[in-house]
Amino acid sequence: MLSMNFATTPRIVLRDGALDDLPGMFAEAGVRHVALVTDAGLVRAGLVAPVEARLRAAGLAVTLYDQVQADPPEHIVLGAVEALRAAGVDGVFAIGGGSAMDVAKLVAYLLRSPCALESIYGVDLALGARLPLILAPTTAGTGSEVTPISIVTTAGDEKRGVVSRRLLPDVALLDPNLTLGLPGPVTAATGIDAMVHAIEAFTSKRLKNPLSDVLAKQALALLSANLPVVLRDGQDKAARGAMLLGSCLAGMAFANAPVAAVHALAYPLGGRYHVPHGLSNALMLLPVLRFNLAAAAPLYAELAPAVGAEGNTADAFLAAIERLVAQCDMPKKLHELQVTRDSLPNLARDAMRQTRLLVNNPVDVTEADALRLYKEAF
């Protein structure tokens, strides 16, 4: 008998100008003082000031926290909690990529349910309440606006995850205007990242289910069709909206049918070399897809039509993914990012710590396998 347990963000708004709804949403939740969580780059880009002004015009107090960093370290999360607790906020809004949204989730939780951050690393250990939380992505990549996951970099450069449905936000606001200025290389890497989420959800050895399958297929269709469009014309608002929807659907899929070896091998690249998460996933995608072929070929064949493959076979699927990656203006090999060959054994050892992810892979991965995959990606 089929068994599944599916959860996602309860309200998702996708439209041109979706941010206009933000003040009313916080008012409905009884929020009076909003924590605005973002990064300094988005402040400089001019995306944050209009949001802050809109909230203040509606009579809401706002405290800006703009110190989020990529692959957010623990001290950033704890610093945000300390600053925003002192300010007395009672609701949290994040505008940004996955890092800003992940920090905001933990801020909302820890402000309402104080505890040691390290005590909630793992699955379903964060069981308390959180403050009202709304997330607005500025990249079509992580899908963090619909996932119950926050990833933190520890002092030892290890990526740890807090996984709990309590981290799902109340609302995901998908506004294509927030992604129009995204540079080509970032658009490419985050777009491939979203495709990784869909592919790994569809091929996951654990918790794969009919809902995640439908979402993953639709996500892949949207992403593969629209990524070339936005790479040619980053101002195409319809295609940007389709990318946001594809990323969101992929996020919903992998939040319930978890990701696997691509992510497990990508995390050490972020921890040790601070390679952006989307790019690290993109770099490891093809080696892992080929590695998994022995077990995943029938599933790849099912996905082939979604990516416009020239035939409904696993080989055609892989060829279509290779063509799409080739179009992307981004590094294609690890050596282009100052990753050294000597470091590959250490990366392989680090990857083996990601047991939460490796258990989902369709093929078991040994440390020797991981090293071979890093060498292929090098």
Image: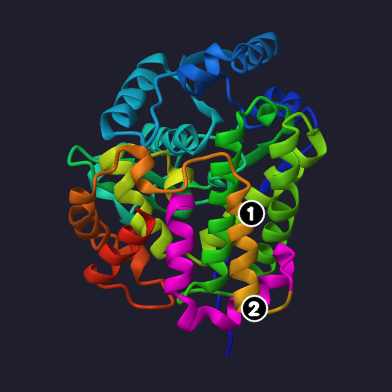
Does residue 285 show up magenta in the picture?
yes
Q: Locate residue 346 relative to residue 30 in the image: left or right.
A: left
Please name whichever residue, 234 or 77, is drawn nearer the observer in this view of the structure.
234
Task: Report the residue marked by disc 1.
Answer: 324
Q: Position of residue 307 (x, y in %)?
A: 70, 63
- Of mark 1 and mark 2, the one earlier in the sequence is 2
Please name whichever residue, 343 or 298, is drawn nearer the observer in this view of the structure.
343
- The answer to whether residue 133 is visible is no
Residue drawn at (69%, 68%) of the image: 214
Q: Which residues are the magenta region?
A: 281-310
Which SS type dominates the magenta stretch? helix
Work out whether 46 lies above or below 201: above
Badge 1: residue crowd in 10 Å (few <14, some 14–19, many ≥20) = some
Q: Position of residue 283 (x, y in %)?
A: 44, 51
Please name whichever residue, 25 or 364, is drawn nearer the observer in this view of the structure.
364
Q: How far apart, in angstroms, are the residues tagged by discs 1 and 2?
A: 17 Å
- The answer to whether residue 216 is visible is yes
Residue drawn at (47%, 59%) of the image: 285
Q: Locate residue 61 relative to residue 78 in the image: left or right.
A: right
Residue drawn at (62%, 66%) of the image: 319
User: From the image, which quarter does the N terminus lie in?
Assistant: bottom right
Which mark, residue 301? 2
Please name whichever residue, 170 or 151, is drawn nearer the observer in this view of the structure.
151
Q: Position of residue 316 (x, y in %)?
A: 65, 73
